Image (cartoon, helix red, strand yellow):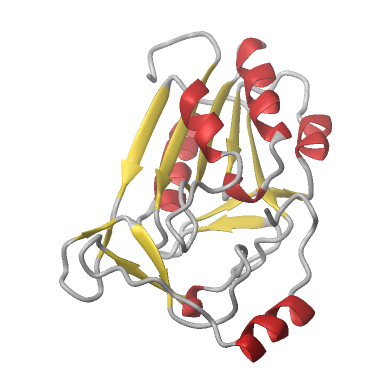
């Protein structure tokens, strides 16, 4: 896709620990090296490693703007930007699909990374629609912690039953054979709801 001069949408999808952010940063850095104007965004809810950077698990970093909604994201896109990167796009509201389409229609290359499924293996937020409208989709896989096979699922091992549970320690990468349905105890679920309130658009 690098040779195409118009706008388009690229999606990097997969489970946790699969290198999505690492691949996003790699593509964005290539654009920076090519002296293109690049802007990077992330959802406010994702503050695991840094609040003003996207960070991969191998410690690659890129400066990013944290925004709460797709509307805020669009409002902060600067005139003359050629490439827009978005990390953890599954946490945004459904309006992010239209935002990506608007940017691509305006001639901007949009590169976004996110979980395509939640811990219950259900489609996550706006990801199904993004996968449908994207010109390019890359599916990446982690390594299953049980059998060392290709892992596509984010296995929850601790925490509550809320769809959004931010934190690496609550998850493991699992393949289809090793995946197990997770159900939290009633008191765990209540604790998560009380201590981790989420924006209405982030929890569906």
Which residue is more in the foreground, 35 or 136? 136
At x 84%, y 31%, the residue is 75
Horizontal and vertical percent for residue 181? 39, 71
At x 71%, y 86%, the residue is 191
Horizontal and vertical percent for residue 170? 49, 78
Query: Is residue 187 toward the left or the right of residue 119 in the image?
Result: right
Horizontal and vertical percent for residue 122? 48, 52
Which residue is more in the foreground, 183 or 152? 183
As displayed, is residue 196 above or below residue 17? below
As drawn, the residue found furthest toward the bottom would be 187
As displayed, is residue 151 above or below residue 101? below
Query: Is residue 81 toward the left or the right of residue 169 in the image?
Result: right
As displayed, is residue 49 above or below residue 79? below
At x 32%, y 47%, the residue is 140
Query: Is residue 153 toward the left or the right of residue 66 in the image?
Result: left
If the image is split into quadrants, where does the N terminus sit?
A: top left
At x 16%, y 69%, the residue is 148
As displayed, is residue 128 above or below residue 187? above
Horizontal and vertical percent for residue 118? 49, 57
């Amino acid at each position: 896709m690098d040779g195409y001069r118009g706008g388009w949408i690229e999606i990097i999808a997969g489970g946790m620990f699969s290198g999505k952010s690492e691949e996003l940063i790699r593509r964005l850095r290539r654009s920076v090296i090519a002296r293109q104007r690049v802007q990077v965004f992330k959802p406010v809810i994702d503050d695991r490693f840094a609040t003003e950077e996207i960070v991969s698990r191998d410690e690659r970093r890129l400066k990013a703007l944290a925004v709460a909604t797709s509307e805020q994201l669009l409002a902060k896109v600067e005139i003359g930007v050629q490439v827009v990167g978005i990390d953890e796009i599954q946490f945004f509201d459904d309006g992010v699909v239209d935002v990506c389409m608007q940017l691509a229609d305006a001639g901007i290359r949009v590169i976004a990374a996110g979980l395509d499924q939640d811990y219950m293996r259900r489609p996550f937020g706006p990801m199904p629609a993004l996968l449908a409208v994207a010109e390019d989709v890359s599916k990446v896989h982690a390594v299953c912690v049980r059998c060392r096979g290709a892992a596509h699922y984010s296995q929850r091992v601790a925490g509550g039953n809320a769809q959004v549970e931010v934190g690496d320690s609550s998850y493991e990468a699992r393949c289809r054979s090793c995946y197990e349905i997770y159900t939290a105890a009633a008191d765990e679920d209540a604790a998560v709801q009380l201590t981790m309130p989420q924006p209405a658009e982030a929890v569906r």
